[in-house]
Image (tube, helix red, strand yellow):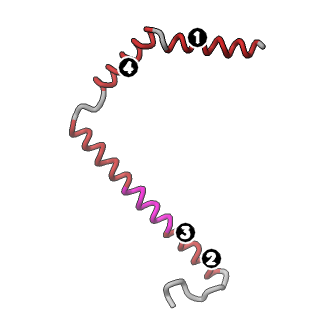
Amino acid sequence: MSELFTLVAVLVIARWYFRSPLCGAMAEGLRRWSKSHGPQDEELVRSVHGLTEQVTALRDEVLELGERVDFAERALTVVRQGGVHTLPGRE
């Protein structure tokens, strides 16, 4: 019973806090701070965008290399087990 009371008390206090003027003032302060400290320089924004594209391209290359390594491992496993005397594609 005391756990239920504690839960209800926490919910009431949280609701009061998030609807209070204090919480509204804090939210407004955070909005103003984020606008004044956000990226304002267009060159910086372009640089970040370019770096994001490069990271995406590198991620794609790493995925492709991973697929190639998986294929090579499977091919070598088949050759080592004696199932094939030549590598696939070299008949």
- The residue at the point 66 percent across, 14 percent down is 8
Q: Earlier in the sequence, mark 2 or mark 4?
A: 4
Which is closer to the viewer, label 4 or label 1?
1
- Residue 64 location in percent, x, y? 45, 65
Expressed as whole percent of the image width and height from the top left, the position of residue 85 reads 60, 89
User: Looking at the rendering, in which quadrant would you find the N terminus?
Assistant: top right
Q: Secondary structure at mark 1?
A: helix
Tell me which residue sits at (62%, 76%) in the image. Answer: 77
Q: Nearer the viewer, mark 2 or mark 4?
A: 4
Q: With respect to residue 6, does 44 lie above or below?
A: below
The Cα atoms of the two marked residues, 1 and 2, are separated by 64 Å
Mark 1 or 2, which is nearer the eye? 1
Question: What is the total number of numbered labels drawn onto the structure image?
Answer: 4
Q: In the rendered structure, does residue 39 fall within the stretch colored magenta?
A: no
Q: Which segment is the magenta one? A: 57-67
- Residue identified by numbered label 2: 77
Residue for badge 3: 70
